[in-house]
Image (cartoon, helix red, strand yellow):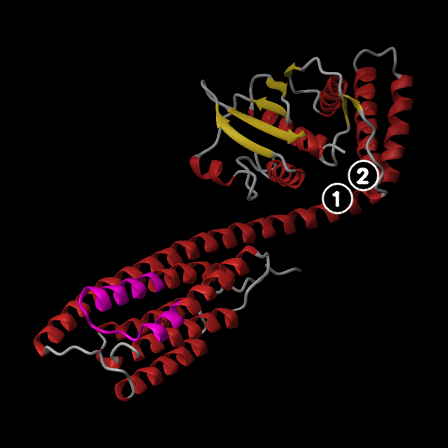
Amino acid sequence: MSSAPTFTLLSTLPARALLGRLLAVRVSLIAGWAAGIVWLHWGLGVRMPLFPMASVLVLMALFSLSTAWRLRLDVPATQMEFLAHLLADLTAFAVLVFFSGGATNPFVSLMLVPIIIAAISLRPRWVWLLAAVAGGYYALLLFYYQPLAIADPVAAYGMHLGGMWFNFLISAALIAFFVTRMHAALRARDQELSALREKQLRDERIVALGTQAALAAHELATPLATIQTTAHELATEFANDPDIGADCALLEKQAQACKRILTQLAARAQDTPPAALPLDAWLAAVIERWQVLRPDARIASELPADGRDFAAPDGFEQAIQNVLNNAADVSPDAVEFRTETHADALVIEIADRGPGFTPAQKAQAGRVLFSGKPGRGWGMGLALTHATLERLGGSLTLTERDGGGTCVRIRLPWSSAP
């Protein structure tokens, strides 16, 4: 007995996705520092060490350009790389603070931003490492720094209060930007993982069903040949009996249809390419074969006058017949079969007058296995059809019909045909 697959869900995004968001924060800080230096040095007359501070900003700008170029490459990133970027930003920020007042600089608390980003994005040990580095930088800046040359203490105090207010605004904006973007990206990734987990569970069930079907086909070959031979003999013997002869002839056709299905399974196992037929002839043959299997069902078909060669991809005919069977199971009236040919795809619509879907069933149709009636209805057949079309690059959509019932729209790109 197989167990359900185990998924390890990380609470963080891939590091490559994080680098793009960190790059936006870094560019914002470079612009903010440049504007602040210009305003203090030339606007307020506070002399700043322009050469070392400009050198740090240029290095940060070059680092940003290299990061942007690196993001254009289809190369995965690691959390260690993201940690290195955070350490580089933190170090550059500490150097800028060293040249602009050290711990007395009201913007020194912006050193918390890399720690917050790390807490959202990285494993705990890397967060603690970054916090330790930031704490060490802050301790050094308490004792080693270049003070700002402000002669008036009152002006210095006013500038400090104004800087603290502006620092609060910047910190709030950066944290809100990064956290909200990260939270949205995490939600999107969790939804993708949930859909992937659901698809894998469904595919595992279908693979298990395919294995059982292959074993059953192997076992059925001999008794089916006996049934076909006996049915042929009975049909010949009772050819003049209108009741028994007709039943025997129907039994022979059903046995021939089953043998054809087994032959197709064997051809797929040998990877034999399908033969190309005119599209209209192929569609007519599909309906005819389905009518042999479902003599009790009625169908009203509209086929296109399209004679282009069409080699049905593996599983496509079975996908159509699954939908036809489901429609015939629930519809008291004839099943409607319509076909359209577009420039890029073949579109088939199969409509019924059944009870339709509940909203919950419609949301999960084709993705999970369910059935409105035991052994019949929209269950395994729709899931198999959805999986087949997804593999072929096609799609299956369900819409409610006016007056009751459901219309299933199957779309197959021409590029999917061999």
| Residues rendered magenta in the picture | 30-57
Mark 1 nearby-residue class (10 Å; few <14, some 14–19, many ≥20)? few
Q: Tag 1, which secondary structure?
A: helix
Residue 9 visible? The answer is: no
Q: Nearer the viewer, residue 188 or 36?
A: 36
Mark yes or no: residue 44 visible. yes
Query: Residue 213: which disc?
Result: 1
Give 238 or 95, whichever is nearer the viewer.
95
Residues at marks 1 and 2 touching, judged by CB atoms closer than 8 Å = yes
Q: Name which residue type carries label 2.
A: Leu
Magenta stretch: includes residue 84:
no
What residue is disc 2 on? 265
Residue drawn at (64%, 51%), measured in percent from left and top?
A: 204
Instruction: Assess disc 2: are there few (<14), some (14-19) or many (≥20) residues with their C-alpha within 10 Å of its C-alpha.
Output: some
Q: Quadrant of residue 103?
A: bottom left
Q: Residue 232, position in %: x, y?
A: 89, 23
In this rendering, position of residue 179 left or right of residue 397: left
